[in-house]
Amino acid sequence: LGLPLGILLVLTDRGGLLQNSVANKVIGQVVNIARSMPFIILMVALMGFTRWLTGTTIGREAAIVPLAI
């Protein structure tokens, strides 16, 4: 899935063979959203541990736990 999206990004970029700024922006947004999914899954998986460690799952202190791991 990553390789075809990467190839499409390169081909539709400025100066690419299939230069298309609209398609490039849409594909770029899809990639950016998909890149954040593993961290969101990690945050949810660590909610219990975070609550045990910091006493809360909301706020700065709670956000530091998954960022540190």
Image (cartoon, rainbow, N blue to C red):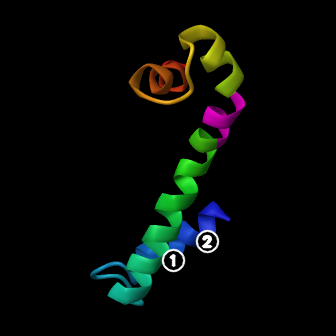
- Seen at 45% across and 69% down, the residue is 29
Residue 23: x, y in percent?
Answer: 44, 86
Residue 47: x, y in percent?
Answer: 66, 27
Cα distance between the residues tagged 1 and 2: 6 Å
Q: Nearer the viewer, residue 16 or 60?
A: 60
Do the numbered discs 1 and 2 sit on residues whose CB atoms are within 8 Å? yes
- Seen at 60% across and 43% down, the residue is 40
Residue for badge 2? 4
**Quadrant in which the N terminus appears:** bottom right
Residue 36: x, y in percent?
Answer: 53, 49
- Seen at 60% across and 50% down, the residue is 37
Residue 35 relative to residue 19: left or right: right
Residue 50: x, y in percent?
Answer: 61, 19
Q: What element carries label 1?
A: helix
The amino acid type found where label 1 is placed reads Leu
Q: What stretch is highlighted in magenta?
A: 41-45
Residue 13 relative to residue 55: left or right: left
The local crowd at label 1, few if under 14, some if 14 to 19, many if 20 or more residues have their Cα within 10 Å, is some
Q: Which residue lies furthest to the top in this view?
A: 53
Residue 41 relative to residue 12: left or right: right
Numbered circle sitting on residue 8: 1
The local crowd at label 2, few if under 14, some if 14 to 19, many if 20 or more residues have their Cα within 10 Å, is few
- Reply above or below: 60 against 16: above
How would you classify the magenta stretch by its main secondary structure?
A: helix
The amino acid type found where label 2 is placed reads Pro
Asked if residue 34 lies in the magenta stretch, the reply is no
